[in-house]
Image (cartoon, rainbow, N blue to C red):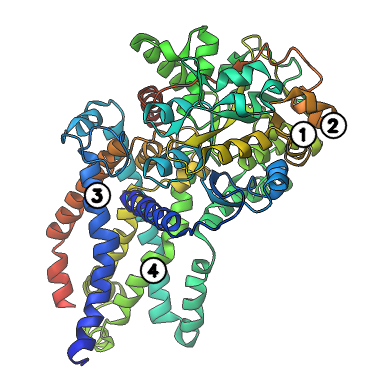
């Protein structure tokens, strides 16, 4: 244990950091969202709070449906990434043996390159003169490059699943690592098939990792805006792009803040419901 | 996502704080000229872009800070970053005037003012008062692939033409979208009624059927032109010049409704420390050597037509239509709009982007 001042410092530093760069900005954004306009300078205090911006969002015909669409995309991306990551993590823990550590490094290798580069790489793969089209042309399966691969929502989903895959695999990997091998042996000696052992023992024990991994993807994907800009095309916009439009082009920070807070609220509700219904707390205790 | 937005606000505040700290810590050295601070765009800080001032006031210390977009620059000034000189672009002048952030320009103290072409002077004039010194300019028009669009483009309508479905790219800008619509509809974008705005919104929602993607930076657009994904796009003359120089078969339309022209402008902050020194800096911007460097090195137009003779690069002459004296008369200069108007334009654009 760190004693006295040292212990305080170890808590204070991260706490101060969080207050300065998370709590305060969040409060500022809350204040911004009830401010009528940005006029009079950022630090102007001469205004009366209003809920007009929230009303604007609720009255718009397309913003909230787009939030719904973004949530569905996030759900799809989260599910696909989890489905792909689970066998990966399972293999690393139970089958890879001594190669596991090398493979784990390979899994997180993409983190060493910039997020933007990884998204742009998909532009090169899916583009009309990209890798997939070139291969299909070369093999004679198509005669004209297909422009349908890039610039749509499917391209956004594919790109995001790729980007998030390691994020989901790691918590599942950690959860599987904690599974006590003797339980698996016990299940085997009690006559359970490998399938039964997996479904009744391994999977339930790894669920906290699955849920954590899924939420790590779902939450940020709802507000994603980079991938839609780069590979989403005309109809690939997500809710995050609308927030970005108001903060950037519109210099309308109040409306942008209101949009962001509505999203924050909705995601919180979804996560709380998910955690309550899936009894994540109990799963965590059991594991 | 909210985290990005948060980071943005926090970052803006930090910048504001830093800028404040920087301006207060500047010690006033006893030099003949005194110090100047300029809120600039990257690449304009090099001495080649202010040759005359540098020669006349060698002891003056010019400090540059940078903005990444018009909105960014406005937000910084609004937050009190406090530079003496601001490099803004049409149509944002009105924002600064309405917020009292800049002061009028005494043109009688500018030795080069008379050489500036009339249209550019007008771009800086609001209610009879000159609020900025125009400097760089360029076009916005329709760029197209001559091999894919052999019939050519003679109207802004081309951006909506189903014949080019899947090969059109519009700039991701609500303001530009309204400008294009106003040309097609033949209306003044400063006097748009609610019905007209609804019509413009529908126009762009329908345009989504032909649009491949909304471009956000020129490199992205140029790549799509080069590989043949995009045939017809809203573009600036810079993209035209670079594609032309790279040998891509492109042409730049001279639409019946007229091209659009944007102008870069320098304004003096309302609380600039040395007004006369700031004026001298702006006067130098209109000097021949600086203008030549802008034209030849950066391929942008300069507001003094007398200097165009130095340009020998035929692609550049073509890209800026420097050999076509009538082009500026046929051009629609970007008109100043208010913050309220921009908000309405961007709200319309957000609805377009959010529509399925």
Give the Cα separation between the discs numbered 1 and 4: 62 Å
Kind of element beneath mark 4: helix
Depth check: give the residue in front, B13 or A268.
B13
Contact (Cβ within 8 Å) of mark 4 with mark 2: no
Q: In the rendered view of the protein, which quadrant contains the C terminus of chain A?
A: bottom left
Which of marks 1 and 2 precedes in the sequence? Answer: 1
Query: Which residue matches tag 1?
Result: B288
Question: Which mark, residue B310?
Answer: 2
Give the Cα separation between the discs numbered 4 and 2: 61 Å
> Which corner quadrant of the image does residue A67 belong to?
top left
Q: Which mark's residue is nearer the viewer, 2 or 1?
A: 1
Using residue A189 as the reference point, say whether residue B86 is left or right of it: right
Query: Which residue matches tag 4?
Result: A169
Q: Which mark's residue is nearer the viewer, 2 or 3?
A: 2
Q: In the rendered view of the protein, which quadrant contains the N terminus of chain A?
A: bottom left
Q: Which mark's residue is nearer the viewer, 1 or 3?
A: 1
Q: Given the image, what chain letter belongs to the residue carrying mark 4?
A: A
Kind of element beneath mark 2: helix
Query: Which residue matches tag 3?
Result: A28
Contact (Cβ within 8 Å) of mark 1 with mark 3: no
In this view, which residue lies farthest toward the top?
Answer: B186
């Amino acid at each position: 244990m760190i004693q006295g001042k040292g212990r305080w410092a170890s808590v204070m530093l991260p706490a101060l950091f969080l207050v300065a760069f998370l709590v305060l900005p969040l409060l500022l954004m809350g204040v911004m969202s009830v401010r009528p306009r940005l006029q009079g300078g950022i630090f102007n205090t001469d205004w009366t709070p209003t809920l007009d911006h929230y009303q604007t969002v609720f009255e718009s015909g397309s913003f909230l449906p787009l939030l719904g669409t973004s949530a569905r995309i996030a759900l799809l991306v989260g599910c696909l990434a989890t489905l792909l990551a689970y066998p990966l993590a399972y293999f690393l823990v139970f089958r890879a043996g001594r190669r596991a550590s090398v493979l784990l490094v390979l899994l997180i290798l993409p983190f060493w390159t910039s997020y933007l580069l990884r998204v742009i790489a998909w532009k090169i793969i899916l583009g009309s003169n990209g890798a997939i089209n070139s291969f299909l042309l070369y093999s004679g399966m198509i005669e004209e490059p297909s422009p349908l691969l890039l610039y749509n929502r499917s391209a956004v989903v594919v790109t995001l699943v790729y980007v998030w895959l390691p994020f989901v695999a790691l918590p599942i990997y950690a959860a599987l690592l904690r599974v006590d091998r003797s339980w698996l042996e016990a299940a085997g000696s009690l006559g359970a098939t490998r399938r039964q052992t997996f479904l009744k023992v391994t999977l339930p024990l790894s669920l906290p990792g699955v849920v954590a991994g899924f939420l790590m993807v779902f939450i940020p994907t709802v507000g994603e805006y980079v991938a839609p800009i780069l590979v989403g095309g005309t109809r690939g916009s997500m809710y995050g792009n609308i927030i970005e439009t108001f903060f950037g082009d519109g210099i309308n920070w109040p409306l942008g803040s209101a949009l962001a807070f509505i999203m924050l609220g909705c995601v919180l509700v979804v996560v709380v419901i998910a955690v309550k219904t899936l009894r994540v707390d109990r799963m965590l205790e059991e594991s | 996502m909210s985290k990005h937005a948060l980071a943005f606000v926090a970052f803006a505040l930090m910048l504001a704080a830093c800028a404040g700290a920087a301006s207060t810590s500047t010690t006033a050295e006893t030099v003949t000229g005194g110090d100047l601070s300029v809120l600039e765009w990257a690449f304009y800080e090099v001495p080649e872009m202010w040759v005359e001032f540098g020669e006349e006031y060698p002891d003056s210390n010019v400090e540059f800070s940078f903005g990444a977009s018009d909105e960014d620059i406005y937000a910084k000034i609004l937050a009190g970053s406090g530079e003496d000189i601001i490099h803004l672009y049409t149509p944002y002048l009105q924002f600064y005037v309405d917020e009292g952030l800049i002061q009028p320009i005494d043109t009688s103290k500018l030795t080069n003012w008379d050489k500036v072409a009339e249209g550019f002077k007008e771009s800086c004039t609001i209610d009879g008062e000159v609020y900025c010194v125009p400097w760089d300019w360029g076009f916005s028009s329709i760029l197209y692939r001559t091999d894919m669009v052999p019939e050519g483009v003679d109207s802004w309508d081309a951006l909506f033409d189903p014949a080019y479905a899947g090969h059109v790219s519009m700039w991701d800008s609500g303001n530009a979208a309204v400008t294009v619509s106003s040309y097609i509809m033949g209306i003044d974008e400063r006097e748009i009624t609610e019905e007209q705005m609804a019509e413009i919104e529908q126009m762009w929602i329908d345009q989504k059927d032909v649009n491949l993607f909304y471009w956000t930076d020129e490199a992205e657009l140029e790549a799509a032109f080069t590989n043949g994904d995009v045939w017809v796009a809203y573009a600036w003359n810079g993209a035209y010049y670079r594609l032309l120089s790279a040998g891509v078969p492109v042409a730049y339309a001279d639409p019946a409704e007229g091209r659009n022209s944007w102008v870069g402008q320098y304004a003096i902050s309302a609380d600039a420390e040395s007004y006369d020194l700031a004026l001298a800096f702006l006067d130098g911007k209109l000097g021949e050597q600086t203008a030549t460097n802008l034209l030849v090195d950066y391929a942008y137009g300069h507001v003094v037509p007398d200097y165009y003779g130095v340009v020998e690069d035929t692609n550049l002459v073509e890209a800026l239509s420097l050999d076509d004296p009538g082009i500026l008369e046929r051009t629609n200069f970007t008109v100043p709009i208010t913050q309220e108007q921009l908000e309405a334009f961007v709200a319309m654009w957000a609805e377009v982007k959010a529509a399925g």
